[in-house]
Image (spheres, grey):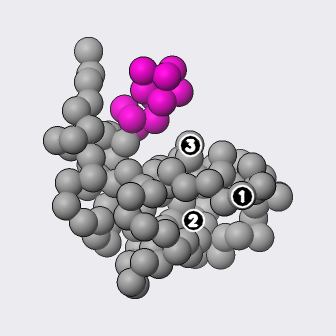
Amino acid sequence: MKYLKEFEIINNGQPKRGDYVIVNYNYGDFHNLNNFLNNNIGKILDINNNEIYISYNVLEKDMLESIKTYFITYEDNIYKISLEMEYTDINFSSNKEDLEILLQANKFNL
């Protein structure tokens, strides 16, 4: 059985370029955007002060029309978003599997 000790594996130090990330921030009434950011793993492209540039590898057919306007097409099937937030509003790790376990745990309220 896989388990995750959040304090040991996730959010260790400062996020850096190349880390995987789950955004835990809610942007007001933008429910579809919040749902996407809270339930998908992105990858940090760059960090500039408190602004974090994150890419998501998502097929265009899987991207809701209502949230496409918040993203910039970076490459084929990769969408980029720029978010200004504190590091406390994200979970990050250099290992994508750590965040996949966290998503599963949150899905089942574990």
Residue 27 as seen in the image, left or right of residue 99: right
* Amino acid at pointer 1: Gly
Q: Mark 1 points at which residue?
A: 28
* Amino acid at pointer 3: Asn
- Residue 102 included in the magenta stretch of the image: yes
Question: What numbered label is drawn on residue 39?
Answer: 3
Q: Where is residue 89 in the image (x, y as percent from the top left)?
A: 45, 57
Which comes sooner in the sequence, label 2 or label 1?
A: 1
Q: Which one is nearer the viewer's eye here, 87 or 38?
A: 87
Q: Mark 2 points at which residue?
A: 78
Compute the Cα span from label 2 to label 3. Answer: 16 Å
Question: What stretch of residues is rendered in magenta?
Answer: 100-110
Tell which tag, 2 or 1, sits nearer the viewer.
1
Reply above or below: 78 against 72: above
Which comes sooner in the sequence, label 3 or label 1?
A: 1
Q: What element carries label 3?
A: helix
Q: Where is residue 21 in the image (x, y as percent from the top left)?
A: 41, 55
